[in-house]
Amino acid sequence: GNFVAGNGFKVVGAHTDSPVLKVKPNSYKRAHEYLQVGVECYGGGLWHTWLDRDLGIAGRVIVYTGKEKFSQRLVHIKQPILRVPSLAIHLQSGNERSALKLNKEDHLTPVLGQIA
């Protein structure tokens, strides 16, 4: 029915965080002859599920257009170009697999390619 002062009301709210790996502004990384992309983890992710999956890139970038001007552009690379590798299962013991503890800064850096 209609609102009557003194009846009260109910408020329902929700909030979700979609876990994502955000590319850092200075994202160039190189380790063990691999070109990597520096990322930061956002949201409460089950990060072990990101291992060994193909990843694309999407988002907004700022580009220099000349004469001290900048422009925003949307980027969406649908094809997989990144991967967060894990150690092959046969190189780990059962105890190591069950005790997997990821360091987000070191273990979730995607690989872009191999440096020739």
Image (tube, rainbow, N blue to C red):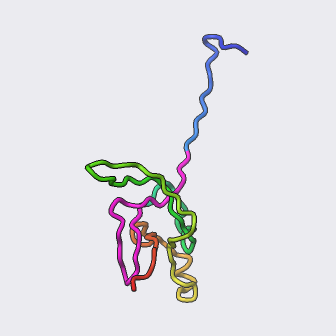
Q: Residue furthest bottom?
A: 90
| Image spot of residue 9 (x, y percent) | 62, 22
| Quadrant in the rendering for residue 93 | bottom right
The residue located at (57%, 67%) in the rendering is 79
Whether residue 32 is in magenta: the answer is yes
Please indicate whether residue 67 sits to the left or right of residue 4 in the image: left
**Quadrant containing the N terminus in the rendered view:** top right
Dominant SS of magenta comes to strand
Give the camera-side residue of 16 and 83.
83
**Quadrant containing the C terminus in the rendered view:** bottom left
Q: Residue furthest front?
A: 67
| 27 over 6 or under it: above or below | below
| Image spot of residue 24 (x, y percent) | 37, 60
The residue located at (30%, 48%) in the rendering is 69
Whether residue 25 is in magenta: the answer is yes
Give the camera-side residue of 35 and 108.
35
| Quadrant in the rendering for residue 55 | bottom right
| 114 over 12 or under it: above or below | below
Q: Residue furthest right?
A: 1
Give the camera-side residue of 53 and 42.
53
Q: Which residues are magenta?
A: 16-40
The residue located at (36%, 79%) in the rendering is 31
Q: Residue furthest left?
A: 68
Give the camera-side residue of 14 and 32.
32
| Quadrant in the rendering for residue 40 | bottom left
The residue located at (39%, 67%) in the rendering is 38
